[in-house]
Image (cartoon, rainbow, N blue to C red):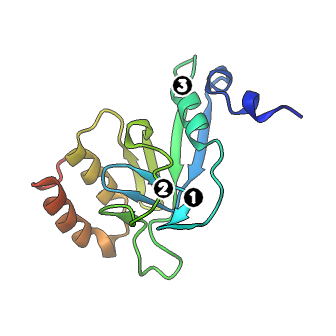
């Protein structure tokens, strides 16, 4: 067995050819901030190597790495979008928006790297559940002082 300091070292992870890491999350806001350990202030799971693996895949020495966040677009009952205008009050930002490149749901892939906040919001709304897109567009307009743009 190897120690976590080695296994989760982004420099070691980056040496893996075509390194693809797929991590999940509880919610993602319209700017791409990721909460993967809590529901508001209530801890749901521990946090592990998400940032390490996303960084390692992004730094892949062969430049073919893919850092991916994958989630269902809604909670199990379909009533609540997991793509949200803002993270819940007290939610931990495990992965900052600067590190997030791809967010994948059952509705597609949002490519966020190098995008403005309005472009990120647009891409995330496109992969949200169709029943929640209108509300997300309104929230994005209010938060970003303008319509999300491709």
Q: Position of residue 57 (x, y in %)?
A: 57, 30
Residue labelled with disc 2: 92
Residue drawn 45% across and 79% down? 78
What is the number of the mark on residue 37? 1
Earlier sequence position, callout 1 versus callout 2: 1
Q: Nearer the viewer, mark 1 or mark 3?
A: 1
Q: Quadrant of the N terminus?
A: top right
Q: CA distance from mark 1 to mark 2?
A: 7 Å
Residue drawn 48% across and 55% down? 92
Looking at the image, residue 147 sits to the left or right of residue 90; the answer is left
Earlier sequence position, callout 3 versus callout 2: 3
Residue drawn 43% across and 41% down? 100
Q: Quick one: SS at disc 2?
A: loop
Q: Is residue 129 above or below residue 97?
A: below
Q: Position of residue 140 (x, y in %)?
A: 20, 60
Residue drawn 14% across and 60% down? 141
Corner quadrant of residue 38:
bottom right
Q: Position of residue 63 (x, y in %)?
A: 52, 20
Q: Quick one: SS at disc 3?
A: loop
Q: CA distance from mark 3 to mark 2?
A: 30 Å
Q: Is residue 12 above or below residue 130?
A: above
Q: Residue furthest left?
A: 146
Q: Is residue 84 above or below residue 111?
A: below
Q: Nearer the viewer, mark 3 or mark 2?
A: 2
């Amino acid at each position: 067995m190897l120690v976590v300091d080695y296994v989760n070292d982004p420099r070691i992870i980056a040496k893996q050819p075509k390194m693809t890491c797929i991590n999940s999350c509880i919610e993602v806001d319209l700017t791409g901030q990721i909460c993967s350990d809590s529901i508001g202030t209530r801890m749901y799971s521990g946090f592990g190597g998400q940032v390490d693996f996303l960084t390692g895949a992004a730094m892949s020495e062969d430049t073919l790495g893919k850092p991916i966040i994958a989630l269902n677009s809604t909670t199990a009952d379909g009533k609540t979008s997991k793509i949200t205008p803002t993270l819940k009050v007290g939610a931990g930002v495990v992965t900052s928006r600067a590190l997030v490149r791809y967010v994948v749901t059952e509705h597609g892939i949002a490519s966020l790297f190098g995008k403005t906040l309005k472009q990120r919001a647009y891409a995330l709304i496109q992969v949200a559940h169709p029943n929640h897109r209108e509300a997300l567009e309104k929230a994005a307009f209010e938060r970003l002082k303008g319509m999300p743009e491709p």
